Image (cartoon, helix red, strand yellow):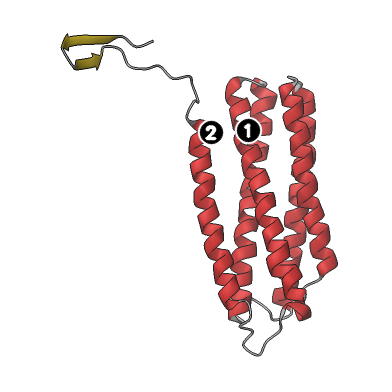
Amino acid sequence: MSTVTQQAPGDFWEVEPHHHHEGASTSIGFWVYLMSDCLMFAILFATFGVLGASYAAGPGPKDLFDLELVALNTAFLLLSSITYGFAMLAMVKNNKNGTLGWLAVTLVFGLAFLGVELYEFNHLIHLGAGPQRSAFLSSFFALVGTHGLHVAFGCLWLVTLMIQVSQRGLIPANRRRLSCLSMFWHFLDVIWIGVFTFVYLLGMI
């Protein structure tokens, strides 16, 4: 606790500073980061909303998108959020092996999502529908590609945490990091639901 000293009436100052627990500001700092990410994705969604119908006499969503493949990819990402939730439950129970196991399953789903997305991008470029083809495709690749980069970073972060947990166990620092990655991973799920609905479903309608 801090000590308050009075020198004169109405004149107070602290002799000792407040002591904060280690990592006390981690969560709020990470929330600030997520809010900044929200703004970035809001700009990308707005850009797609403006340019999404500018096909430049080229192919549109109905000509390019495979909705079944995108639905499968969506299932991969949604399942990865569920398995990450199981990892967090195992962490709460102080079950190190269970935590690592569910994190590994989450990583598999995350990599499967990235694999399908890379296949889709490669297929579109092979058809001549690259980002330079039209404003629609430029905004599409920017939005979906940015989300994919976030998932790739999340997978790298996940591998790093698995190594730290395996070496140092479920110490308080690793628990904080797992909680931050949990917020990040579920945030990516919410963004993808918006992408799936706004870009793919509405585009096919």
Q: Nearer the viewer, residue 80 or 124?
A: 80
Residue shown at the point (80%, 39%) measured from the top left? 105
Residue with the mark numbered 1: 179
Position of residue 25 relative to residue 93, above or below, is: below
The location of residue 138, given as percent across then percent down, is: 59, 74
The quarter holding residue 42 reads bottom right
Callout count: 2
Position of residue 15 relative to residue 169, above or below, is: above
Residue placed furthest toward the left = 8
Residue with the mark numbered 2: 27
Query: Residue 32, can we see it?
Result: yes
Q: Earlier in the sequence, mark 1 or mark 2?
A: 2
The quarter holding residue 67 reads bottom right
Q: Nearer the viewer, residue 151 or 185?
A: 185
Residue type highlighted by circle 1: Ser
What is the C-alpha distance between the residues marked 1 and 2?
Answer: 8 Å
The location of residue 91, given as percent across then percent down, is: 72, 25
Q: State the quadrant of the C terminus.
A: bottom right
Residue shown at the point (63%, 26%) measured from the top left? 175
Q: Is the Cβ of the residue at disc 1 closer than 8 Å to that at disc 2?
A: yes
Q: State the quadrant of the N terminus.
A: top left
Residue type highlighted by circle 2: Ser
The quarter holding residue 53 reads bottom right
Looking at the rendered structure, the secondary structure element under dot 1 is helix
Residue shown at the point (50%, 35%) measured from the top left? 28
